[in-house]
């Protein structure tokens, strides 16, 4: 797990212009991703969680350069992803692949499974010699737990879970080093979800893949991830290893998010203290000043009565480890503290 | 549930371990044979299949009073979808009941028939292709299936109301939300527009929509997902129904909003004492709000029991597998999730015997070829449909799960 850093994102920003009027003047920007930095090590899984609209999928697309960033950089294997072009870019894209969320729309219904999984070889013909492609596709089908004889079938002949396996097979066809999984199991049934999660873990062990695992299901992310980044309104608010984030969260948003997830155990009903967040996520086109979370922050409200501490309203907190030992991992809150200790500061 | 009306979804490839064609055997209560399933019925043959058609018109002043607190009794309900590819037996003899103030959770995967059950109770099945072919839906003692559409309309909304998963497509985009809520009062109660609008504002306040007096004139797209869901809840509770059916009410929402909506539903139920049927596949939500659980698989109930015993001692192998395979937030289990192998069955080619047998590790010959197991009482309030329910291995699996949630001690971060 503690391999070398293979992918490094620094201050990634992606703003989408909002156009209005007859001449389509730009009247503002949707700040989908607004300053995200992290390292990804070879063979590890970095989970990215957050509510819808927090920018996690845009982040995934930026990492493949499916979107051009507004600013910031991604360094992959020592080279800059956004200045690369031509054969250099093609080489880098070979090593970073993606699995999409919806297995129903991400596979071309007019192509056979063999064509879908073999298509990457058309773009990167040097990976597998032309004669060996069919065999390689069958190997891949076998690897993801599908019958290699089904190579000539069409996507509609498979169920959702099987289709997602086809998507995974396409993702690993070129032996990538990094696989971005954008909500790979959220469209699947509960009993099938576990199969696909197990498949991803098996492939990681066998192929030493690094995953960026984007999901909104916090329990699934805990299961599969080594480290977890929590996003809110385009920024990472907390970043740490799985146990740090889930057992000792220090950012009030993470704490509220975790407490909102229902636990499948009726004997805990009523004993769990839920932190109820009021209202909805603010629009990323017009994010709050200072700390993005201060409009919904229960900790700020608790500390300063009905108002909000001026610090939270004015200064954007950095994603850093707090020196006083209260947060051993990076947390973007001026008052980052584990929950138990929060009672003391309040 | 959309897969049910999507022939391609059902007809999708079959699990490799099961050779579909060799296992086709009549489903109980039907006359389909292996021959008939290989060769789909013609449209004319399908039309000749019998189904239930209501004709009774109730007097206008009919009153509904539950007997001994029993609101709803569904008995041996059967629903089928008649399509070009063949007949899909979506529900095969489902029975359950609902009491006043109670929350019954119907748990199941897509294609298990949980939404179709709700649609049959409400009388909003798309016909064709869906037909109720058997059973009873007794509301306060009266079988709704025998009622003519005219009488059924009086029950729908006023007595039994429903909220749907996707609030954006359930609301009409060209009318203001106030207009849509007020419609309930204008049509069912004959109120004039001004009074109905005032009632709409009152309801929006009741579901905690801030600035209700101004927002009443807004259109659905001007609300966020959580607020739209609140508007749908407001419409559902407008006429003080005795039963609220919530079909995946929070599946499309974020967890923080989901918590708000479930809280609101609990609050409303507490105020009005209505019975609630919660349809979901989320084991966490069920554990938080349900009193009783009915687990569905392939159009049958496989286990019903109060919520505690189901989680502590699941008795049906499917329920056991389901509970084991869900990753938990409060503990990191081992590397590999104990997944249920295989896939949910194809409703057009249901396996013989117990529909779960191709995925069941305890299956024996009687499961593969015998009649599908019926619900039998195993504990005071618990019923399970499994031939092997008393086998030591199945019992052992039930106990092993009971000991898994040892994570309570490691969750101090979540529970201060």
Image (tube, rainbow, N blue to C red):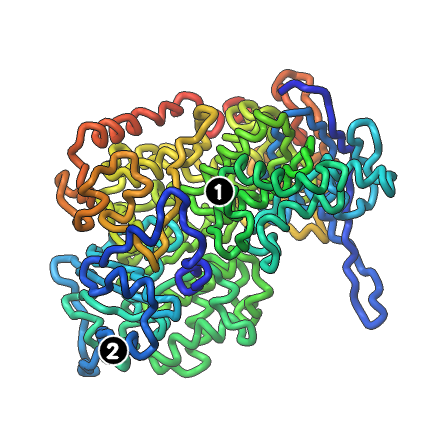
Residue B393 figure quarter: top left
x then y, percent, for residue B263: 41, 48
When the figure is inspected, residue B125 is found, relative to residue B276, above or below; the finding is: below
Q: Position of residue B238 (x, y in %)?
A: 37, 68
Chain letter for the residue marked with disc 1 in the picture: A
Give the residue at mark 2.
B48
Left or right: B76 in relation to A119: left
Mark 1 surroundings: few (<14), some (14-19) or many (≥20) residues within 10 A: some
The residue under the point 59% across, 24% down is A241
Task: Using a 10 Å C-alpha cutoff, classify the residue at mark 2 as few (fewer than 14 neighbours), some (14 to 19) or many (20 or more).
Answer: few
Residue farthest toward the front in the current orientation of the protein:
A131
Q: Closer to the camera, A165 or B57?
A: A165
Percent x, y of residue A200? 54, 34
* B92 over A236 or under it: above or below: below
Asked if both marks, 1 and 2, belong to the same chain, the answer given is no
**Residue B105 appears in view:** no
Please name whichever residue, A5 or A309, is drawn nearer the observer in this view of the structure. Answer: A5
Please report the residue visible at 64 percent of the width from the left and 35 percent of the height from the top: A212
Residue drawn at x 27%, y 60% is B34
Dividing the image into 4 quarters, which one contains the N terminus of chain A? Answer: top right
Q: Which residue is mark 1?
A: A147
Image quarter in which the C terminus of chain A is found = top right
Q: Secondary structure at mark 1?
A: loop
């Amino acid at each position: 797990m503690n391999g070398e850093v293979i992918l490094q994102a620094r201050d990634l920003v992606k703003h989408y212009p909002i156009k209005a009027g007859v001449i389509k003047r730009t009247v503002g920007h949707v700040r989908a991703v607004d300053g995200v930095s992290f390292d990804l090590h070879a063979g590890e899984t970095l989970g990215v969680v957050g509510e819808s609209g927090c920018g996690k999928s845009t982040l995934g697309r930026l990492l493949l350069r499916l979107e051009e960033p507004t600013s910031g950089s991604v360094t992959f294997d020592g080279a800059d992803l956004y200045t690369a072009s031509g054969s250099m870019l093609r080489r880098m894209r070979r090593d970073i692949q993606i699995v999409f969320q919806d297995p129903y729309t991400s596979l071309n219904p007019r192509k056979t499974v063999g064509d879908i999984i073999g298509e990457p070889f058309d773009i990167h013909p040097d990976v597998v010699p032309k004669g060996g492609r069919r065999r390689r596709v069958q190997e891949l089908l076998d690897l993801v737990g599908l019958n290699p004889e089904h190579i000539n079938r069409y996507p509609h002949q498979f169920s959702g879970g099987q289709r997602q396996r086809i998507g995974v097979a396409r993702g690993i066809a070129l032996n990538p080093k990094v696989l971005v999984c954008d909500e790979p199991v959220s469209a699947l049934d509960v009993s099938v979800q576990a199969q696909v999660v197990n498949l991803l873990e098996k492939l990681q062990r066998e192929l030493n893949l690094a995953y960026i695992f984007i999901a909104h299901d916090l329990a699934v992310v805990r299961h599969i991830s080594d480290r977890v980044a929590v996003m809110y309104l385009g920024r990472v608010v907390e970043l740490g290893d799985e146990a740090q984030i889930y057992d000792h969260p220090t950012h009030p948003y993470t704490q509220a998010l975790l407490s909102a997830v229902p636990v499948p155990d009726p004997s805990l009903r009523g004993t769990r203290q839920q932190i109820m967040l009021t209202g909805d996520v603010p629009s990323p086109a017009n994010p709050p000043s200072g700390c993005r979370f201060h409009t919904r922050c229960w900790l700020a409200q608790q500390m300063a009565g009905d108002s909000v501490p001026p610090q939270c309203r004015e200064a954007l907190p950095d994603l850093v480890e707090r020196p006083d030992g209260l947060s051993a991992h990076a947390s973007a809150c001026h008052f980052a503290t584990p929950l138990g200790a929060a009672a003391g500061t309040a | 549930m959309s897969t049910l009306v999507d022939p391609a979804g059902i007809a999708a490839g079959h699990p490799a371990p099961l050779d579909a064609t060799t296992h086709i055997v009549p489903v109980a209560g039907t006359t389909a044979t292996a021959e008939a399933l290989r060769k789909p019925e013609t449209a004319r043959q399908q039309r000749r299949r019998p189904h239930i058609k209501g004709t009774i018109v109730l007097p206008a002043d009919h009153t509904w009073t539950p007997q001994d607190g029993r609101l709803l009794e569904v008995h041996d309900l059967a629903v089928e979808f008649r399509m070009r590819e063949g007949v899909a037996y979506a529900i095969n003899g489902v029975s359950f009941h609902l009491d006043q103030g109670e929350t019954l959770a119907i748990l199941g995967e897509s294609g298990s028939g949980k939404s179709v059950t709700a649609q049959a109770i409400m009388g909003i099945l798309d016909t064709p292709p869906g037909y109720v072919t058997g059973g009873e839906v007794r509301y306060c003692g009266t079988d709704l299936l025998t009622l003519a559409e005219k009488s059924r309309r009086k029950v729908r909304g006023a007595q039994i109301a429903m909220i749907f998963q996707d609030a954006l497509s359930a609301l009409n985009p060209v009318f203001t939300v106030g207009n849509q809520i007020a419609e309930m009062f204008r049509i069912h109660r004959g109120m004039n527009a001004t009074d109905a609008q005032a009632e709409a504002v009152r309801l929006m306040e009741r579901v905690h929509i801030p600035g209700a007096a101004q927002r009443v004139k807004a259109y659905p797209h001007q609300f966020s997902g959580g607020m739209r869901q609140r508007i749908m809840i407001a419409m559902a509770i407008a006429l003080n129904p005795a039963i609220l059916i919530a079909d995946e009410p929070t599946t499309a929402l974020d967890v923080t909003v989901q918590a708000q909506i479930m809280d609101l539903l609990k609050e409303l139920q507490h105020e009005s004492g209505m019975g609630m049927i919660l349809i979901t596949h989320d084991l966490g939500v069920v554990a938080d709000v349900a009193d009783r659980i009915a687990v569905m698989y392939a159009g049958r109930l496989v286990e019903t029991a109060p919520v505690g015993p189901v989680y502590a001692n699941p008795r049906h192998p499917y329920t056991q597998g389901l509970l084991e395979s869900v990753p938990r937030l409060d503990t990191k289990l081992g590397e590999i999730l104990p997944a249920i192998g295989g896939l949910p069955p194809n409703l057009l080619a249901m396996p013989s015997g117990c529909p779960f047998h191709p995925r069941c590790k305890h299956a024996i010959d009687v499961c593969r070829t015998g009649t599908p197991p019926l619900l039998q009482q195993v504990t005071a309030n618990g019923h399970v449909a499994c031939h092997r329910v008393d086998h030591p291995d199945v019992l052992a699996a039930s106990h092993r799960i009971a000991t898994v949630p040892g994570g309570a001690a490691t969750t101090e971060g979540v529970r201060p």
